[in-house]
Image: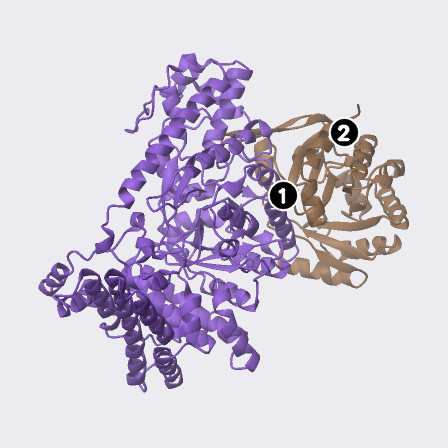
Chain colours: A brown, B purple
Amino acid sequence: MIQLNISDIQHFSVGDGPGIRTTVFLKGCNLRCPWCHNPETISRDTVTLTYPKANKSVTYGRLMTVDEIVREVMEDADFYRQSGGGVTVSGGEPLLQAEAVAELAKALQNQGVSVLLDTAGCVPWSRFEAVLPYVDTVFFDWKTSHPTVMKERIGGDLPLIKSNLARLLQTAKETHIRIPLIPNVNTSEEALTAIATDLREVGAKTVALLPFHRLAVGKYEAMGIPYPYRDTPPLPADALRRAVEILSKNFTVYTEK
Amino acid sequence: MLHPNTELLKQELRTPPAGTYAPHIFRAEGLTAHPDAPHGIRRAYSIASLFAAPKPHIYKGDTVVGSIRPLWTDATPEESQAAAEACTGFGIRGFHHNGDHYAPDYHTILTEGIPGMLSRIEASMEAHKDEADRVEFLESGRIALLGLRDRLAAYAKAAEALTGAEGYHSETLCQIKKNCKALCDRAPVSFPEALQLVWMIHNCFVCEGRYAMALGRMDQFLYPFFAHDTEVGTLTEDEATALLENVFMKIYERRAYLGGDDVVNIAVGGVKPDGSDATNRLSFCILRAVGNINLPGPNLSARIAPTTPEDFLDECLKVIGTGLGYPALMNDEVNIAALSRYGYAIEDARNYSMVGCIENFITGMQPPWSDGRFDTPRFLEYVFNNGKGYFHPSAGLDTGPVESITSMDILMERLETQLKAGVKEYVDGFNRVNVLPDPENYTSPFLSLFCKDCIGRGLDINMGGAVYPSVHGAALMGVGTLCDSLAAIEQVVFTDRIATISELAAALKANFEGYEPLRETLLAAPKYGNNNDFVDKYAVWFVDFLSDEFMKYHTPDGGGYYTAMAANVSNIYAGHVIGATPDGRRAGEPLSDAASPTYGRDTRGATATVLSVTKPDYTKVACGTVINQKYSPSMFEDGRREKLRALIRVYFAKGGQEMQINATSTEVLKDAMDHPEKYPELVVRVSGFSAIYITLAREVQMDILARTQQE
């Protein structure tokens, strides 16, 4: 039986797509965004977070079969039906386990549960092809249009990501492009204009903005590793306003919290 | 936004009255004026003078009048002492004697008015003319009712006298005068008149010293007036909301001047007696008015039926999201089904409202409510300790040495034996106390007027006048603690066999000192609230067994024993005297709260909590349950509220009975502990009643903080 390397399964997720959802966070990521707010998912290995004040520690990382995951997420089937929700597969980068994710999504689709894939898109297109038939919606992260920033600070391949998004938008699959607004990475006018150019080229119509917050500080402390963004305040309101202004010239813009 | 009048009233309530609170001075007037009348009649005169003798107080912000402020007097200690002596023998019934916690029948007096009620009393006197005691009781009701009429007349006069006084609006005073005067002579014909009549009656109950008097289904009995006025154009919805605000603000008067935590329950929504949906535009106005007031006191309950419109549930969540914690959301279907087990006519069950915190009550048809606490984990202690508490004084049965418990079945059998004896002891104790006041000398002539069918029968509310007998609620405490304990025993002792039952008993006795590894193992066993049948089955058993057991008993006048799963903060105090429990809880720590899982142990998210807590059959819990849930304020924003609505709908469809939601962030609560001066009006809802957070003991504040923040 095929297994998935799971970081955590979060019930009653309300920020990861429509309705009430269960989010399956997968372990392992091929990018290294320095602002990452799910640092426990980056490594494929188990990671233990220790909270001395709460006298508690939590370990992330376990193998689960598709059946086991389906059984757990189907507990909430009534909530999905009532709210128009479903299951979100996130990470980490879920498409690093594309074959297993496809099995999971197929099993859920068979049970009438809507599946949402949350990806950063830096994988061969074949991984998308394996999963897309069983997925209703895709959340596609767009972090930067600066090739050097992408390569050196994030460790990603911009041309590959761009070509994947272009192909994805040509399918009929419902796709939401989500831009995390990170100070000193992509909030300057120049950076946003470059993003707008790229996204226009691939045929995007709508973008969602996710302003930076530093709520992950506690996770880094609990992992005992430094957080480069620990002293960066939340994105100021005027920076968000400017970003909305710039991107609104070409796209319908939403802001998420 | 508060209406300017209500804002003004709020400011005025900040200045407490001068002098001494001395209602007995006004009671004494009626008693001394009629020294030779029979006891019940003298009592009626004391009530009438209590209502009508104090000089009315009208606030500058008042649009509806009726205040307890005149009960403060500048009488000398000697005068006060003399009045108190005159009142000897005329005490009033307390909570355990069906004295308060009541939802009056307001519908009848709104329909017939004071004159109509007087004629009905006279007709009944005629019908019972050969039964002297009934005629006397009816005469006492008549006297008390005339006291209400005189009070209205006095307020009309006072409004007239104040015309031109600084800070008062002549137009408002004129309206007050007209309303009060009209109500002396006829039934109300407009919404302001109807609301004035209801408030004046309620205010009379407060003057009498009764607590937790509900206003009940205001959106039903006031609706015909509201509908008429808005249709003909003499009233807008905003004007109705402003009038309601004025009334709700005055509920706070008692807390402001006398302290305490009086709660006045108001039920909105639900179904009508015929089963059709009852939500109307007035339901929305009441929600908004309570939201605008944002003070504890008006304890708002929203009855949610499958037919309840989505926009009404949404409006409820908006009000909750202001941080107020109101309204409590009640599952209409479950409550009606639960009440129906007690033999009420279906239309009466459907017309229920709540008294006090959440207690289901057959509106205006039974004597006032009473309840008590039944803490369950101590019975497990008796099983482990030969019928004795580790350090609390009470005792159960000796069901044998703990080492002879060789299976879960034997343990459950002994626990049930203990519980059965405990239920009987509880019932015997209450039934003894309940009948202590001699009915003849503790009549309630005014209260009885608002209970069917006291006038028709010519009998007091506590002497057979009420259509249905009195009921009593036993609040079962510690479901989470007990279920987690039983699951831990099953897992650790009888399944994994990591410890023997004797070792466990020794660990409990030692409060886990020297047994830390065993405690860790017990803590790791499945916990209630995570949708795990291994432990949830004990919650199902808990409700079935205890409710069935209580249902076998009756109150002294033949009414039912209800169970409840709600206990305000009693779970904290009950925990103080209970030793360590097998779930890993240390001696003295709080028991689990109400019907909720133990704090912090429902770790799989709100959906799993809902799936667990809907497993028991709450149609056996006629008084009601409380499930406390806390969500961060963002859950109440547009786009998120619909998800919360979906959660609630599923919760109710699966048979959940009640949900009480707090919307305050942990950060705010922590900050308020250290900087109370910054949060003078921060309201939290603690399992059934609302309180100003900074007034709570630090321990209770910590408890609120510890509740799992779902999201």
Q: Quadrant of residue B156?
A: bottom left
Q: Residue furthest left?
A: B78
In the depicted view, which residue is nearer to us: B224 or B34? B34
Q: Pinpoint residue B232: horizontal percent, then vertical percent.
A: 55, 82
Q: CA distance from mark 1 to mark 2?
A: 36 Å
Taking the spot 70% from the left edge, 33% from the top edge, the residue there is A42
Q: Quadrant of residue B193?
A: bottom left
In the depicted view, which residue is nearer to us: B279 or B495? B279
* Element carrying mark 2: helix
**Quadrant (top left, top right, bottom left, bottom right) of the C terminus of chain B:** top right
Location of residue B602 with respect to B400 vertically, above or below: below
Q: Check if mark 1 and mark 2 are on a common chain.
A: yes
Q: Pinpoint residue B577: horizontal percent, then vertical percent.
A: 33, 31
Asked whether residue A21 appears in the rendered view, the answer is no
Please tell me how many numbered marks the rendered image carries. 2
Name the amino acid type tagged 1.
Tyr
Q: Which residue is mark 2?
A: A66
* Element carrying mark 1: loop
Q: Residue furthest front?
A: B130
Mark 1 neighbour density, 10 Å: few (under 14) some (14–19) many (20 or more): some
Taking the spot 67% from the left edge, 26% from the top edge, the residue there is A46
Q: Which residue is mark 1?
A: A229
Q: Pinpoint residue A168: horizontal percent, then vertical percent.
A: 87, 46
Left or right: A99, with B155 as reference point: right
Of marks 1 and 2, the one in the foreground: 2
Location of residue A80 with respect to B515 vertically, above or below: below
Location of residue A167 with respect to B229 vertically, above or below: above
